[in-house]
Amino acid sequence: MTVPSFPDTGRPVAELLAELDALKADDLPTRGENVTAYVYDSGRPEVRKAAERAYLAMLEINSLDPTAFPSTVALERSVVAAVASRLGGDEATPGIFTSGGTESIMLAVKAARDARPEIAHPRMVIPVTAHAAFHKAGAYLRVAVDTVPVDPATFLADPQAMAAACTDDTVLIVASAPSYAQGVVDPVEAIASLAAERGIPCHVDACVGGWLLPWLAEAGADIPAFDLSVPGVTSISCDLHKFGYAPKGASVVLFRDTAMRMAAYYACASWPGYPVVNSTVQSSKGAGPLAGAWATLQALGAEGYRELGREALEATRRLVAGIERIEGLEVLGKPQATLVAIGSSTLDLFELADRSRERGFFLQPQMAVDGLPASVHVTLTGVSARGVEGMLTVLAEAADEVRSQGPAKPPAELAELVGLLDLAGMDDATFASLLPAAGWDPAPTGSPAMAAINNLLNVLEPREREMIIKRFVSVLYSPYLSTGDTNPAH
């Protein structure tokens, strides 16, 4: 559906809202148990209503200047203190409310970098399973990223290997709780101890697990220590728009001391306008997400999160047990959170994902990297328990359908052709014209078939993948995919 650009005269509100509904027709659902990535649903309409009303109540409040809008200070103090109370801190623990995990991670990297201004070429050491946000932070902040292999069977970071990768220029060491791809918690105590011995800050990426793992532990899961209670951990990130079930745009980064939080701030008085001081990458920012997060925490309370944690843990255990009964599928590693990676050496996993989506269940494709196998990812939330049996049925049916095809066999000549293309210099129209050969319909409707292009990406080197997906997104926002027109003159 083509969206009109700028009208000469204003349009009726009812017409606009109807158009939005039509545009959303092919979107993944944001509620229910069938979407296992991107969205998090508490399954409690009254909690969602509280968040919506709080969000709208603060829609026009600008968090740029806390002295102009002191309500934002009170709300942020409350939210940060709530997160700190579950992650080894208390109401005095310094923290920042951010727009999401990537911004929290970027601030942690900035703080570590700026705390060591004498280092001209800073570096950080991360396990290969660390989130892409660390690579993004490194690129934006000019901090080199040294990746370290993990155990190929458990997918856990190797503390000794990470310590060996440190140099005099290392300003940060990273651990995940859990790593997103396989849902395992790195040995934070050992990593943080080795970091402390070297005088290097240690950040724990608990964006997914920070507001989940404590409740899983209360539900009986074996969760290793990972938060600020661990000596040597100097900062930790925790998303509330994941297992906090708050509206999107809600995360917190905590610091062990105020000096590190100060290093995350930015201030500028070198211009003739108002003095600028930002606690986040953003300057002007609506207070809606902050209010929505606060309202969600208050509406659910500890008992609400305990119940959601129990339900998500039960769903995960049932899913893991069920996958083991499906021929050709296996769970990679031993997930400690409610994130599961499904692997296979005999089935085309990306074709399996397409067939599952046709049946109403979205599985997230994950590519092979550094010797770690490709997989499809499932995140289970508080509403997932009611859909586990349906998901297992769909997985079994999809596996039966693709079993005769065997493992994926992307055309070797297509992978070789990619290496010959000038992807950086190519225009959007030309790239769009090549997509059908890779298995992508340039004018898709409904659920797109992604197996062919995902299998192609899976056999390419990461740098080639990155160039292709950047080109693809560029084309996606051009007119050429929406119309099928690949002639730039039209």
Image: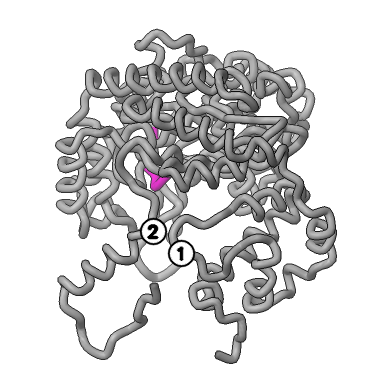
Give 433 or 265, whichever is nearer the viewer: 433
- Residue 114 is left or right of residue 221, and the answer is right
Give percent across and percent down for residue 455.
Answer: 69, 48
Give 222 or 278, whichever is nearer the viewer: 222
Q: Residues within 10 Å of mark 2 (few under 14, many from 20)?
A: few
Q: Would you say the residues marked 2 and 1 are in contact, meaning their CB atoms lie under 8 Å apart?
A: yes
Q: Which residues are magenta?
A: 95-100
The quadrant in which residue 100 appears is top left
Give percent across and percent down for residue 401.
Answer: 58, 39
Give percent across and percent down for residue 185.
Answer: 56, 21
Q: Which mark is residue 26?
A: 2
In the displayed structure, 208 sits above or below 49; it is above
The quadrant in which the C terminus is found is: bottom right
- SS state under label 1: loop
At 57% from the left and 69% from the top, the residue drawn is 442
- SS state under label 2: helix
Q: Is residue 212 magenta?
A: no
The quadrant in which the N terminus is found is: bottom left
Q: How is the image coloured?
A: one colour
Q: Which mark is residue 323?
A: none
Q: Earlier in the sequence, mark 2 or mark 1?
A: 2
At 64% from the left and 19% from the top, the residue drawn is 191
Give 117 or 146, whichever is nearer the viewer: 146
The kind of residue tagged 1 is Thr
The quadrant in which residue 435 appears is bottom right
At 26% from the left and 51% from the top, the residue drawn is 287
Q: Which mark is residue 445?
A: 1
At 45% from the left and 37% from the top, the residue drawn is 261
The quadrant in which residue 253 appears is top left
